[in-house]
Image (cartoon, helix red, strand yellow):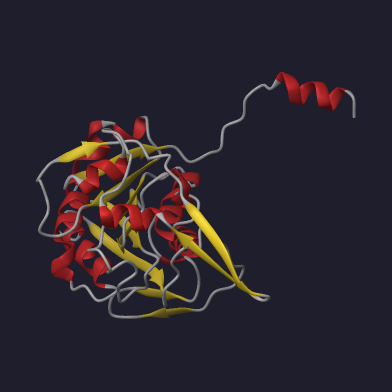
Amino acid sequence: MSESLDILLTNDDGIDNPGLLAVRDALSEIGDVTVVAPASDQSATGRAMSTDVHVEERDHGYAVQGTPADCVVAGMEALGPTPDLVVAGCNAGANLGTYVLGRSGTVSAAVEAAFFDVPAIAVSRLLEPGQVGSRDLTTDGYQTAAHATKYLAEHALGAGVFDHADYLNVNAPIAGQESGDMRITRPSDAYDMTARRQDATHVTIHDRMWDHMESGDIDDPDGTDRRAVLDGHVSVSPLTAPHSTHHHDALDALAQTY
């Protein structure tokens, strides 16, 4: 690891969230960390982008009135040195499964960095049952996630990990239930969203995967991110960002008859 390692750190829970502060403290031991993070909670904003954002310099870094994707672009182009690595997190709540990859602000920050051709790590932490969405944790509750992030930031670049992956989606288990192991995983493809119409103007949307996780009633096989985290391991999924396209005979035929 080079002593000149520059790291851009962001999140989607807001600049004052203890998860970000825990990761900042860990990464500061191995490099120069520039924090550019949302001024307020921007969870589940995906890659939403603004055209003009207010920036305020605070003790922790730059607070941006915008989304995590805004923060990455602003940090890259206007507020800090060009980083060797972008880190997003640590998020309060796990980001597991293929269906959350486009929804999560934490993961979307890493994807935004990938389009700049800068390696990135998105890191999240599973919360205790009934604590989903909680922002009440202290920095002590993020130490496993912070340690894993520091380890990957220190070693992954030199090991050639990012020759094959654009970003890593890292998830840590519930504090106190850690196995001490790190597992390389793939995102689970399990999906269970429901919607119920309450009245003429109100529909309730619910992600039932959280219910399955809290009860332990999941079908995720070994090798998936959700299975690894529920078993107490740190999950690391190596992922690529650009959408791929493939030759499609049926679509070619439709175009020819248009």
Image location (x, y in percent) of residue 78: 48, 65
Image location (x, y in percent) of residue 222: 26, 33
- Residue occupying the far right of the picture: 258
Image location (x, y in percent) of residue 227: 26, 42
Can residue 153 be seen? no
Image location (x, y in percent) of residue 199: 63, 75
- Which quarter of the figure is the N terminus placed in? top left
240, above or below 23, in the image:
above
- Which quarter of the figure is the C terminus placed in? top right
36, above or below 106, in the image:
below
In the image shown, does 13 or 116 lie closer to the viewer?
13
In the image shown, does 49 or 76 lie closer to the viewer?
49
Q: Is residue 76 left or right of residue 124?
A: right
Residue 144 sits in quarter: bottom left
Can residue 159 be seen? yes
In the image shown, does 142 or 198 lie closer to the viewer?
198
* Residue beneath the point at 43% across and 56% down: 109
Q: Is residue 38 left or right of residue 151?
A: right
In the image shown, does 180 or 2 lie closer to the viewer?
180
- Residue occupying the far top of the picture: 249
* Residue beneath the point at 37% across and 44% down: 119
* Residue beneath the point at 28% across and 31% down: 160
93, above or below 230, in the image:
below
